[in-house]
Structures are given as structure tokens and as C-alpha cells.
Image: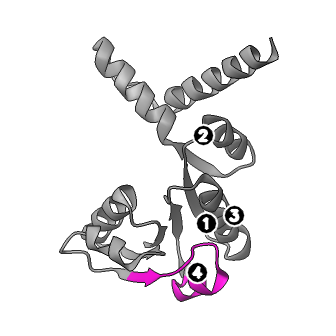
Amino acid sequence: MKIVILGCGRVGSTIASVMSREGHDVTIIDQNADAFRRLSSDFSGKTIVGNGIDEDTLRRAELDRADAFVAVTNGDNRNIMSVQLAKVRFKVPKVVARIYDPIRAAAYAELGIETVCTTCVGAGLIRDKVLGREFSTFEEYLRLGITNASMEGEHERR
């Protein structure tokens, strides 16, 4: 599988290293060349210094040939913009964006953009660990964020 990843922070470098080790064709993009030092020593993919919402950068990454695109920068807006470009302009079959804000994650999911809200997943995992529960499902963790966000909105209206 050909995978393009935007963002070579802790999460992006881990995904890239694991997928490369599993034999996938991985290209990772980051604006900072120093970020690539986070990649494992056995990473066999391609690194590109550039902006992930720039079409020329995405062309250099051969996004038009990718089976999947993952956006895991530290910015929700950049992640959403890049996955929309990947999905609409480059016709990538599988796109996933990491989103921190539960409200945005839910809204984008309703628009058909696959998101992973690490805020919700992390909170749910920690809750289950503290309470000694079995880990729940991904969907349940996402509902925690949606429920919390709707309760925040309720408090603001009062």
C-alpha cells in the first residue's frame, strides 16, 4: 500500500516507521527537515520537506498514486484542509485526519471525512484505566467527546 503522511511529529513518525517496517511504500511530509530525525533507523520510505496544503508538495509526494493519506500535524485546520485536498483533488481512496477538537471531529465526520479525535480517545482510555474497566470501542470514545461538547454548549446558552 502507498501511504502519504503529513506531519513527522511523535505520531506521524511512529506511523511512518511502523508502516514502513510492515512493507508499505511510505512518504512523509513535514515543513521542518529536523523532524525526520524522529523516524526509526530502519525507515525505508521517502521524506519531503514542504507544506502539506501546497499542491506542488503533494504532487512531489505522488499523492495521486497513494492508497491512503494521513494528516497528523499539530493543527486541526491544516489537517482538514490537506485531507480535503487529498480526497477531492487527488482522489485518494482513504484519508484520515487527526483532530484535537471534539466538536470539529464530529462535524467533519458528518461530512464524510474520517477523523480520529485523540482528545476523546485519550480521555476514554484514561477513564477506563482509572476505573479498571475493559477498554471500550473507538466509537464509544468519540461519543464521549460529542456528549461533552454538547454539554458545554448547553452551559454556554444558560
Q: Nearer the viewer, residue 40 or 78?
A: 78
Give the residue number, with chain letter if any, for mark 1: 93
The stretch in magenta equals 47-62
**Mark sitting earlier along the chain (1/2):** 1
**Mark sitting earlier along the chain (1/3):** 3
Label annotation for residue 58: 4
Whether label 1 touches label 4, CB < 8 Å: no
**Residue 118: x %, y % from top left:** 47, 41
Q: Determine whether, in the image, residue 54 is placed left or right of residue 13.
A: right
Q: Does the stretch in magenta take in 84?
A: no
Q: Quarter of the image containing the N terminus?
A: bottom left
Q: Give the CA distance from mark 2 to mark 4.
A: 25 Å
**Mark sitting earlier along the chain (2/4):** 4
Whether label 1 touches label 3, CB < 8 Å: no
Q: Residues within 10 Å of mark 3 (few under 14, many from 20)?
A: some
**Residue type, label 1:** Pro
Give the residue number, with chain letter if any, for mark 3: 84
